[in-house]
Image: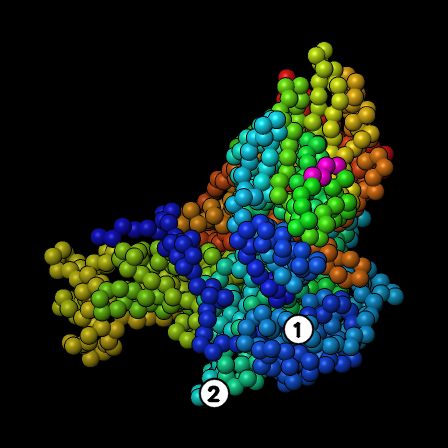
Amino acid sequence: MAIDMLGSPVKRTEDPRFITGKGRYLDDIKLQNMAHMAILRSPYAHANIRSIDTSAAARMPGVIRVITGADIPYNPLPMAWPAGGSSGIQNNVNTPRALATDSVKWTGEGVAAVIAETPEQAVDALDAIVVDWAPLPAVVDAEKATQPGAPQLHENAPNNVVFVWNVGDKAGTDAAIDAAEVVVRQRIVNQRLIPNPMEVRGDIGWYNPGTEEYTVWMSSQTPHIQRLLLTAFVTGIPEHKVRCISPDVGGAFGTKIFCYADMALVMFASKAIGGRPVKWVESRRESYGSTIHGRDHITYLEIAGARDGQVTGLRVKTYANLGGRLSTIGPGIPTTLYGRVLAGPYKFPNVSCEVTGVYTNTTFVDAYRGAGRPEATYVVERAMDLFAAEIGMDPAEVRRRNFLAPDQFPYDNPSGLGTAVNGEKIFIDSGNYEPAMDKALATVGYADMAAKKAEAKARGKLLGVGLSTYIEVCGVAPSKWIGAVGEGWGAAMWESANIKVHLTGKIIATVGTQPQGQGHETTYAQVIAHELGVPMEDVIVQHSDTQGTPFGYGSYGSRTSSVGMTAAVKAAAKVREKARRYAAHMLEANVEDIEVDGASYRVKGSPDKVKTIQEIAFAIDLGFSLPPDMEPYLDETAYHDTTNCTWPFGTHVAVVEIDEESGKVDLVRYVAVDDVGKKINPMIVDGQLHGGIAQGVGQALWEGAIYGDDGQLQSGSLLDYALPRASWLPNLELDETVTPSPVNPLGVKGVGEAGAIASTAAVANAVVDALRPLGIRHLDMPYTAQTVWRAIQGSKGGQA
Amino acid sequence: MIPAAFDYQRSATLDDALKAIADGGGTVKLLAGGQSLLPLLKLRLGSADRLVDIGRLGELKGVRRLPDGRLAIGAMTTYSELAASSARHYGVVADALPTIGDVQVRNRGTVGGAVAHADPASDLAACFLALDAEIVARSVRGERTIPVDGFFTGPFSTALATDELITEVRLPGPRDDAGSAYASLEQPASGYAMVGAAVVVFVAGDGSIEGANVALTGVGPHPYRARAVEAALAGSDRSAASLAAAAAHATDGIDVVGDIHAGREYRTAMAAVYTRRAIEAALARLG
């Protein structure tokens, strides 16, 4: 009998190849006769292109072809998720072309491409392309871009406004704020981040002149979607003529969900040079202009309530910077995924939110780990601390008085989850918030913080403690909800799995989701082995190739376990049922009398009349003695469309110490109690939390994209953009509560984004808590030493 | 990240290398550990017609004690090798080495390379200034010894002639009355010092401060000796107030630099803070 590994911290089956350098990432693929592409990128943030002269570049050594936008008949890239609701559907969508033709809107937008024999020759030839530029004034700040007189990016978007989107009860919230005993107002900035997966993006395009079919290798989270978008919207090539393959993907964090110009470009380039494969891999520096950025909100928040701690209203006005052109689902992030979860875990009676999406001369902005939910959590968790400080109540107590109670679920929140445009509603289906907070507070020693602050002060340190009591939306999403026009991205979000039990009893599962380092090959195998009672090592999970895997929407939004693995559970159930029917045939019994116990199928009451799934597979796959109503082979496919999202929650607590003289912040403790439902592999869950927390802490303390007023990215490399390092973090103290999700048979919720959603606000609240004795009530991130020092100096001058 | 094309030549002997740079007329760059030069070339912030690789010149490797007690550090000694050598007994060097780059950089980067590259935020440059080190330079024309004070003339520029190569850095011998330390505030992305203070203090028999060498890096156009701090420390008592008052002169006469990570005002303030901390740490080493 196989040992059941479901719920066990088994080591990841992927890791031996990843940690011994045997992973096969995009740049590891070297095809015969492959040519290489380099892209000339705009040095200006905003300019018109008068002309492009490629003649000298075409004569450079090794150059095969130079391409400009005028050569390419393709459509602009699609934008699949317009902000809906009161904003209607935008008619001012401006997306990138494979190469820009008339103008550029940010530094790094591609304007020409060189295909050469070697990558070096391609890069060298870029210098020989002559572009006659007409530079224009630039604007990089979303709020300033909407002001009169700001440089205008697109004729169809006056004042650079992409949309103005409203959600919640505006009149009710206005009234609640007008009537409130206490109102706290604050402008807060959620700064722009550069995601930086370890593996940058790249593509290889190959046009096969014999079959007239294309194969595109891409470092992507969504090969099936890219095939759909590239064919139906961009190139006009029929969908069945294109195959997309995502090899091992070395991290993505959302950046590899999207349809990028380079994908279309390698397809065009390969055909243009007669069908040689063409590879393009971005450099790290290049990626800062060719791959999406995240966050970048300016928010005016107002939180109102009574001195007893009850919050009565939250009103939010946000400027969301979407960059120079729209990315694939850019408008969906600061609307549905932000505005609709602004109430967090709280029973606020009134919430309203207005979001203005804005074009600026910056790299486009789209989903980055958490995607809208970190921004929402940051707003509501800072608001709770601001409110607590104003009324002189402990922040934990204020949260306790506003938490939803366990008996309030399913909960239709006032920030709009229940007001989807076509009447489709989703509800927060479960939660139990206080026990997670109590556990976290006990672990960190919250009651002793006053003494710890005094002890630290004696050492010249300001100690602060900060909470983030978050909820998030995982397991996206019911198709009818996310597919609603204007609400979601106009496509479905079900998932798929096929399971084949081969003649030798070995199992191959193919799935529509797409790992980027999460360990799906391990966790799917744990689930399928559990369902079929076989050893885990007898199950192999294949993915990432539109040829050979069932269609799927890919991996993002912490959806793979909840949606994808439910499809696998359903496919396994179909396999089990067919095996049971064939076992009845083999054992000459009625199907109703066959009991399944792990891998054994036995006749009720006759323990020695038994067949294993391997024996059954051998017989049915051969098909020598099939009953007339049965087809050969144990081969079943299932699709799963979820009935709801999942709703992880938890409490994170950060403790920081600030060096009063230098402003340097050290994170000294970090406690996280997360409720992600049941766990398929607790070790992988911990790893996801470690990485997510580190990324969120990175935003609070170190990371920030900095543009000059001219639109030049000043934090343009890893020498100037600070990613968190392991040695800067304390031991992360993780704990759990377990409230199984009711929406899927595994009871799982998802954990890919939770750490990043929760941790930024916890650290921010801790830093402000440490500075509060100086009279500082808010400070914008990142809390670099200089930023904190300036705040401390300002407080001494009585300015804060 | 592909550099512009360049020729590459590996020198078998020191004389080969000297001849190559003499003939190159400034278009040749020496490749030591490559930890600064290669990133610059890859980012296309710099270029060279030819790189002359001196990384395998064994005669430039290693740390040895001179008969007069001084310590001679071969230019091709890596940071890691330096940290394992007797140079580690200089507190200022022991403090600074672990803050340089990461393990890979410390295993490849060289002492001579760092000094010749003259990054305005070089940690080791400040240490050598505080230690009153000497730079030994050689060319086809011969050898000369250059005091480190005055060697750094600007961002990435030194007193070396284009045909000269650093063969050795010499540190003074150990003294019982001296204590030293290095304290720095790093720019988190690059790891370079936004402010680095290297201090050697000399203490009289009665415990008072007889004198001090104080050097700062990351603050001005190049690493420099903070003479006003030294003057204030000479003959000073060791009270916190006196040390802070002396350290407050850390940027006297210096055109303090500012960038996106640390503006002038912040760097100026931190120069005083980290100078004081380094002085305190150096004194603490003396007990």
For marks 2 and 1, the one nearer the N-term is 1
Please tell me which residue lies in front, A592 or B181.
Answer: B181
Provide the residue designation for mark 2. A209
Seen at 53% across and 81% down, the residue is A270
Three-letter amino acid code at the position of disc 2: Pro
Q: Are marks 2 and 1 in contact (CB under 8 Å)?
A: no
Q: Secondary structure at mark 1?
A: helix
Seen at 22% across and 73% down, the residue is A621
Residue at the far front: name it: B141
Q: Label 1 lies in what chain?
A: A
| Quadrant of the image occupied by residue A449 | top right
Residue A456: % across, % down: 66, 26
Seen at 67% across and 22% down, the residue is B178
Q: Is residue A120 left or right of residue A385?
A: left
Is the magenta region chiefly helix, strand or loop?
strand
Residue at the far top: name it: B206
Quadrant occupied by the C terminus of chain A:
top right
Specify start and end residues of the magenta stretch as a single range: B145-149
Residue A410: % across, % down: 54, 53
Provide the residue designation for mark 1. A126
The relative height of residue A557 versus residue A228 in the rendered view (above or below) is above
